[in-house]
Image (cartoon, rainbow, N blue to C red):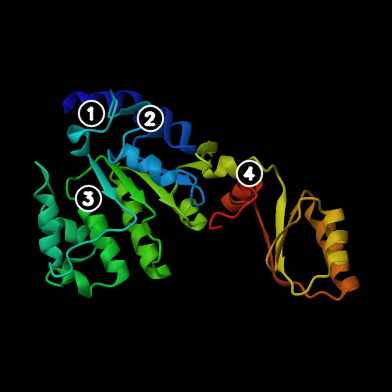
Amino acid sequence: MGYYHDMADINGTLLQVSELTKHYGDIRAVDGISFSVPRGTVFTILGPNGAGKTTTLEILEGLRPPDSGTIEIFGKRVRRVDRRVKERIGVLLQEANFEPYLKVHETIELFAAFFAHAYATRDIMALVSLTEKRNALVKNLSGGQRQRLALGVALVNDPDLLFLDEPTTGLDPQARHNIWSIVTGLKERDKTIVLTTHYMEEAEALSDYVCIMDHGKIIAADTPRALAARLGKETMIEFTADQVPAAARNSLSGRFPQLRQDGGTITLEVADLVPALQHLLGWAAENGITLDNLVIRQPNLEDVFLTLTGRRLRE
């Protein structure tokens, strides 16, 4: 155990993956990906359904064997994540099915019994803000409370490396922000977190590094700011408009070749803001189009993802 800690501290990398593959017949779910996760960071894997995110996590969690490739974790190369490694990782799956008639504290105690060393139940409940629900049955918890319980269970062994697979899917905004707050607190305690998400704003709020996957491959990886900077110094003008005639849209795209339309939302990528706005306002007046919800902003991860894949993250 000490050997692992020494190696991780020396090179600053807790997890390194090289040329990892997993195929199912002709489907290349994970197709030769490589990346490294620095200690004490949130490393986010982004991608639409079918990109290979969950399969990648399942391999790293020890739930599936890889077809090929190498994994170096806690400073030691392993063919497959074994029991010794699992003592030091925590896992929050997409769906956590707990016994509905157990109480909250009983559920945490049950999972704590699986490990040689575990947090006190009261400390876990305090960490995920469930102390007042100590004696509540699992079946009576709200969606956000159940997800906080799942996160508490993933933390019972005080893991150095935590895998969170879409931790806030289906939660309301308040519950989502509660999970974000817990994740931020964990990073402040030098925990290393590998996160997958379908929410671009979640990735932007939490991530130190972002890896974008599509069709089993990594197509970009860097800090969120560096990824956005790849789009250059352009500014985004975004607005909604109903019933834009094809001729009017074509004339606008002739002036702004990087125009994107998603339903009623149109996004323009512009290098010089003032003349671009003047042209847009003139175009709207000439075609009798009302520009609603007009926003001027800098490029973000959503723009990067759209540029690289031609799709929004949640498509």
Q: Mark 1: which amino acid?
A: His
Of the two numbered discs 3 and 4 in the rendering, the one whose residue sits closer to the viewer: 4
Label 4 sits on a secondary structure element that is helix
Label 3 sits on a secondary structure element that is loop
- Give the number of the disc on residue 308: 4
Residue 42, position as x, y percentages in the image? 39, 44
Sort mark 4 into few (<14), some (14-19) or many (20+) by Cα contacts within 10 Å: few
Q: Earlier in the sequence, mark 3 or mark 4?
A: 3
Calculate the distance from the C-alpha at mark 1 to the C-alpha at mark 4: 37 Å
Q: Quadrant of residue 53?
A: top left
Of the two numbered discs 1 and 4 in the rendering, the one whose residue sits closer to the viewer: 4
Judging by the rendered image, the residue that carries numbered circle 3 is 155
Calculate the distance from the C-alpha at mark 2 to the C-alpha at mark 1: 28 Å
Position of the C terminus by quadrant: bottom right
Q: Mark 4: which amino acid?
A: Leu
Q: Earlier in the sequence, mark 3 or mark 1?
A: 1
Quick check: 25 left or right of 231?
left
Label 2 sits on a secondary structure element that is loop
Determine the residue located farthest toward the right in the rendered image. 286
Q: Quadrant of residue 124?
A: bottom left
Quick check: 219 left or right of 259?
left
Q: Mark 3: which amino acid?
A: Leu
- Give the number of the disc on residue 67: 2
Judging by the rendered image, the residue that carries numbered circle 1 is 5
Residue 187, position as x, y percentages in the image? 33, 46
Q: Earlier in the sequence, mark 2 or mark 3?
A: 2
Position of residue 226 relative to residue 92, above or below, is above
Label 1 sits on a secondary structure element that is helix
Position of residue 65 relative to residue 135, above or below, is above
Mark 1 touching mark 4, by CB under 8 A?
no
